[in-house]
Image (cartoon, rainbow, N blue to C red):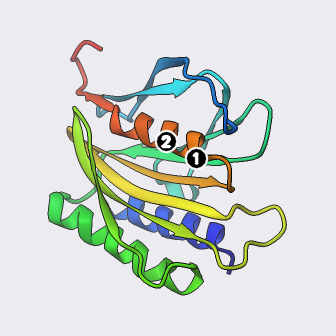
């Protein structure tokens, strides 16, 4: 199974439980309502297309970001309120589980769980390089989960070589995510 497909399947399971290399630096704060549970605020790069896709089986909707022009990349962000309490240890273990599932398909002999700290949250992610990406697939994967207030932000970043700036912008978007409870001002 291609790494992208594994990433999508694993990301969907975790959430259910619980631009090109010279990319523009211009971002806009966008607000994403969470069904009766407040909202998540993300700073989205202006050079990205955005699409909100429904999740299978009634799970949280996923934001898909792709380039308006230039080489292909895919960023998936799934903000939601977990069904079970996810403390820091559970988030780290969920990401460690992702790393174990991606290991066989990655170039790296060992995938390390990396910490992600933001002003409003804390989480973990893993980086992997696909051994044999299929035509039209991406070579580089960054995937993780960040707790932001009462919400979680699960994310997958798919890029190819030369798109390090896109990956950095996407990680910064997650790092800067904010959560506002229902009734709280933005």
Badge 1 element: helix
Judged left or right of residue 69, residue 175 is left
Q: CA distance from mark 1 to mark 2?
A: 6 Å
Which of the numbered marks, if any, corresponds to residue 19?
Answer: none
Q: Which residue is mark 2?
A: 168
Nearer-the-camera pick, 15 or 133:
133
Can you give x and y, in whole percent of width and height, for residue 12 in the image? 49, 62
Judged left or right of residue 123, residue 171 is right
Q: Counting other residues with Cα less than 10 Å from the Cα at mark 2, is it few (<14), some (14-19), or many (20 or more)? A: few
Can you give x and y, in whole percent of width and height, for residue 33 in the image? 41, 28
Q: How many marks?
A: 2
Judged left or right of residue 137, residue 76 is left
Q: Which residue is mark 1?
A: 164
Labelled pair 1, 2 in contact (Cβ < 8 Å)? yes
Can you give x and y, in whole percent of width and height, for residue 79 in the image? 41, 43
Judged left or right of residue 46, residue 145 is left
Q: Residue at x 34, y 64 (%)?
A: 17
Q: Residue at x 55, y 22 (%)?
A: 25
Q: Residue at x 35, y 72 (%)?
A: 112
For the N terminus, the quadrant is bottom right
- The picture quadrant where one finds residue 176 is top left
Q: Residue furthest right?
A: 135
Can you give x and y, in whole percent of width and height, for residue 109 in the image? 47, 85
């Amino acid at each position: 199974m291609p790494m992208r497909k594994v990433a999508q399947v694993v990301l969907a399971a975790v959430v259910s439980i619980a631009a090109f290399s010279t990319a523009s630096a211009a971002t806009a704060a966008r607000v994403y309502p969470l069904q009766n549970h407040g909202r998540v605020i993300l700073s989205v790069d202006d050079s990205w297309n955005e699409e909100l896709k429904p999740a299978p089986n009634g799970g949280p909707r996923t934001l898909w970001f792709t380039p308006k022009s230039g080489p292909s990349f895919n960023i998936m962000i799934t903000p939601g309120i977990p069904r079970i309490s996810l403390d820091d240890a559970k988030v780290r273990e969920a990401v460690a589980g992702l790393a174990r599932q991606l290991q066989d398909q990655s170039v790296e002999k060992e995938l390390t769980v990396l910490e992600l700290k933001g002003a409003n949250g804390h989480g973990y992610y893993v980086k992997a390089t696909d051994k044999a990406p299929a035509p039209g697939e991406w070579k580089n994967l960054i995937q993780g989960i960040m707790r932001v207030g009462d919400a979680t932000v699960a994310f997958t970043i798919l890029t190819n070589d030369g798109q390090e700036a896109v990956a950095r912008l996407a990680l910064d978007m997650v790092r800067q995510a904010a959560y506002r409870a229902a009734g709280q001002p933005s």
